[in-house]
Amino acid sequence: MLRWAAFLNYFSPFIFMEETTDLLQLRRDKLSEFRAKGINPYINRFHVTAFIADLIQPHLENTKEELEEKNLETVVAGRIMSRRKHGKTSFCNIKDGTGQIQVYIKKDDIGEASYENFSRFDIGDFIGVQGRLSKTKTGELTIFSKQITLLSKSLLPLPEKWHGLKDVELRYRQRYVDLIVNPGVREVFVSRSKIIQALREFLNERHYLEVETPMMHSIPGGATARPFKTHHNALDMDLYLRVAPELYLKRLVVGGLERVYEINRSFRNEGISTEHNPEFTMLEFYTAYADYQDLMVLTEELFRFVGNKVFGTLSFPCSYQEDGETKEATIDFSRSFDRYTFQQSLIEVGQIPPEAIATQEKAVDYALKNKVPLDKKDNFGKVLGKLFDHFVEHHLVQPTFITDYPLELSPLSKKREDDPNLVERFELFVGQKEIANAYTELNDPIDQKERFQQQVAQKEAGDEEAHWMDHDFIRALEYGMPPTAGEGIGIDRLVMLFTNSQSIRDVILFPQLKKEA
RNA sequence: GGGCCGCUAGCUCAGGUGGUAGAGCAACGCCCUUUUAAGGCGUGGGUCGAAGGUUCGAGCCCUUCGCGGCUCACCA
């Protein structure tokens, strides 16, 4: 019925005008009305001579007299964001990708017919404005228009100017609207882009080569995670979306690309939370002839570089949770980051008595007494890992390196020379979140093969996240990989940190949601 | 998956113990030639997330379901 009416309306613009007050229908009516007048509501081109920011920046400080003396004729375009009609004159604000500016429209200046058309425009419409730049008597920089052109008609009303769009579900589902009406959203994604640019710059300066490796793996490897499965029809082959690029990047180190990095998506078929999106962006970089100690130094430099480059500061406000309350801290990247070994952190940060983690039995007891849920198959390392998650992680607000993890948690890391139960690995925590994970890479093919075999045994015992055997990766290591250190940084979480965002959904343009009802 | 909270006009929100659904903004009409959350007068606009149930009567109570948020669990 509605469609039929719209169809009729398209050809007979005025038939239904008096019969409906429906907001959406009204705009469609206007569309037809403009077409009937010979005005194309979606014109093919319009040439601007300036972006709005280019008008504001150099002229904000000029007086009205100075501006009029300069006689600044300009042509700009943008979306109508607000409007104040006063009979035979109107003000509106238009916004383009660079900024927002006020436009003054006077009937005597643009002509009666144009003024009539303008008064039929809606908030949300794109218009082109030709006019002279000056100031109003209240001192606001304003384009005094001589000609107004409809560029694109908007058929859906925007959220109101004052409260904006608050409904989080709508904000995520209709990010385009969120971006139009909530200025802070755009800022976050501009920051995100600049952070990624800065990371590239940091690495390129140090002679890292950016590469792209497969997203579709026949053997998903490089992380303990459940993959998404898909199928290639022509090859009749199951494929998995990658959970990490790690094993391919290390193959490239074998091949002589001694400094490589990739910034790209990985996919993990796991729960969704304020810190987890099924697809997320990681930076992984590998450095031959370096170890994890070198990477800690480099990581501090990297954070300082990004902070200074993008935000011009090294201190960032950070909201975090403590005892069920939200608290504020200032993250300081200028001082050297705290360091604890994994074991130290359990004792000193987590306040776990040293004897409670002396053996697997005691650790299990301690965990169960403190209601830390364990799995029967958990080995010593995994039990300690769960104790860490429960007692330590939420205390780590300021940048903190946790080093020397249990072997069982790290099937791709090189063992410490002085303690084969520990590996040369660190994770960086900031604002209660794991931001980076790095280690001296295991390059002993025989050791790596054994570790894979242990993982396969765990997988066969029902651990769906355990690593798979990757014979080609072993073969690559058998050709010889130089001593190498590698690091992964979660870009989404990094952006959360720098923009003080509380949810990963606020730094991903289109976060994963259930399908619309 | 568990717990808690939410879903009412295009948007933001009100709607004590069940009794004819409201406001602001937006929209529409009229007035208004420098306003800026412009102003004045007037008007229209609702599947109250969905489906059942209880009741003379449900936005409100009950059940199931959907979507979202937070949180716990799972999970790096």
Image: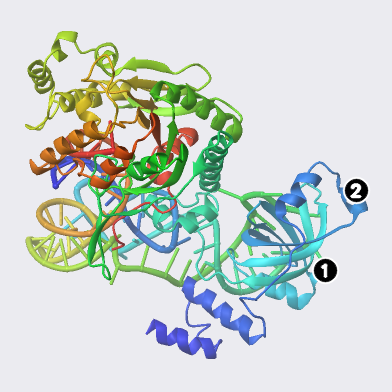
Label ID, residue A109: 1
The three-letter code of the residue at mark 2 reads Glu
Q: Amino acid at mark 1?
A: Asp
* x, y percent for residue A45: 68, 73
**Residue drawn at x 63%, y 81% as measured from the top left:** A34
Dot 2 corresponds to which residue? A65
Please state the chain letter of the residue tagged with numbered disc 2 in the rendered image: A
Q: Is residue B51 above or below residue A453?
A: below
Q: Looking at this rendering, what residue extends furthest in the front direction?
A: A479
- Compare marks 2 and 1 and give the one earlier in the sequence: 2
Residue A209, horizontal then vertical, whole percent: 51, 42
Q: Is residue A33 above or below residue A172?
A: below
Q: Residue at coordinates 84% horizontally, 44% vertically from top-left?
A: A62
For disc 1, the neighbor class at 10 Å (few under 14, some 14 to 19, many from 20) is some
> Image check: A474 left or right of A382?
right
Is any atom of residue A323 visible in this view?
no
Kindly identify which chain the residue marked by label 1 belongs to: A
Q: Is residue A395 visible?
A: yes
**Image coords of residue B4 (percent x, y):** 21, 40
The C terminus of chain A - image quarter: bottom left
